[in-house]
Image: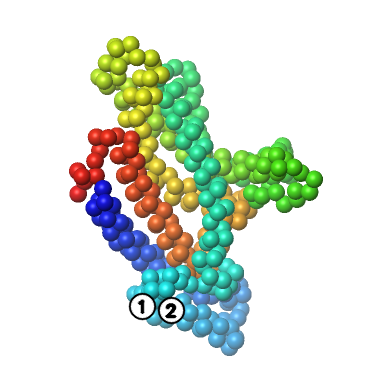
Amino acid sequence: MGSYLIKRLGLAFITLFVIMFVSYALLRLAPGDPAKASMFGEGQSGGEGLSGDKGAFAVNQVMRDKLYLDKPLYVGFCKWLSGVVMRGDLGNSVSVDKGRPVAALILERLPVTLSLNIWAILVTYLLAIPAGIYSAVYPKSFSDKTMTFFLFFLYSLPVFWAALVLQALFCEGGRYPFFPLKGLSVYNTWGMNTWHVLGATAMHYILPVFCLSYAGFAGLSRYSRSGMMDVINMDYIRTARAKGLPETTVIFKHALRNAVIILITLFAGLIPGLVAGSIIVEHVFSIPGMGLLSMNALNSRDIPLLMALFGFGGVLTLAGLLAADIMYVIADPRISFQGRR
């Protein structure tokens, strides 16, 4: 196992290097001037109006020097990479809270996004697996057909549209104002005990977590159903039933353990997908997390901050793949690291 992990980590570093180089190249080659975008915001008229002014030109040139925009692409990337590897310095933001270290910005926003996505993952798996098992045990029943229609309907809904509709209907100022309009925390806790604060905080989480999890829940439940139906029809399941074992033992002990392999495979891509989806959800619900930070960085072409965010997404994806490989062995003893090359 140790040699396999060393090989995988080495491959992960090479993959991450390629991801970061391609990301930096795309940021540099994209249309527009990153220096002006960082100074004034992409698409704003301030940069155009000041472009002829000597002071604005000087500031623009300082920004270009700071971002190595006048240097060849590979030189700028090597400068950024050397700062990360040699000093552990991700650089300073040039647009979002100008001058603040990128690492401080990410560490400030990361707990918010992590709390949101952890709840979304828990909800997705805790609901998707039982729904898939039920549909597989009772295939082609009325409940299975109804669930299939409902899940495909959920899967087809765009996240941004669903978030805006839910906000317009069920948030403060909407038709049925049951939930808070924005944020994840209670701003005024005066006169509230601990349970009231926890309840009010949970109300902030319900709609954002639903928007993050409903598409994953719909997809995972269908995969869970498909995996269970393949396993249920195998000979060893018939043998277990012929021995007189209870149906719950057959389903949850013998069938589920083999059917869960496909869910482990999907887990590797679920976490990065949720983080990417949180950009829209956090923007709609004004949640100060990594998603909103990414949106602001993209709008202002903040290269140091974007590079750190791309690196975070790459590490998250590679860690998910490695975690999936380890969970394969836990779920199925027939799988061994010694057989992998």
User: In the picture shown, does residue 209 fall above or below 240?
Assistant: below
> Can residue 158 be seen here?
no
Instruction: Look at label 1 and name its amino acid.
Output: Val
Asked if the residue under mark 2 is in contact with the one under mark 1, i.e. CB atoms within 8 Å, the reply is yes
Question: Badge 1 is on which residue?
Answer: 75
Residue 139 pos. (x, y %): 40, 19
Q: Residue at x 39, y 57 (%)?
A: 314
Instruction: Look at label 2 and name its amino acid.
Output: Tyr
The foreground one among 175 and 241 is 241
Q: Residue at x 58, y 77 (%)?
A: 48
Residue 101 pos. (x, y %): 53, 70
Question: Badge 2 is on which residue?
Answer: 68
User: In the picture shown, does residue 234 fall above or below 218?
Assistant: above
The foreground one among 174 and 122 is 122
Identify the disc placed on residue 289. none
The foreground one among 260 and 218 is 260
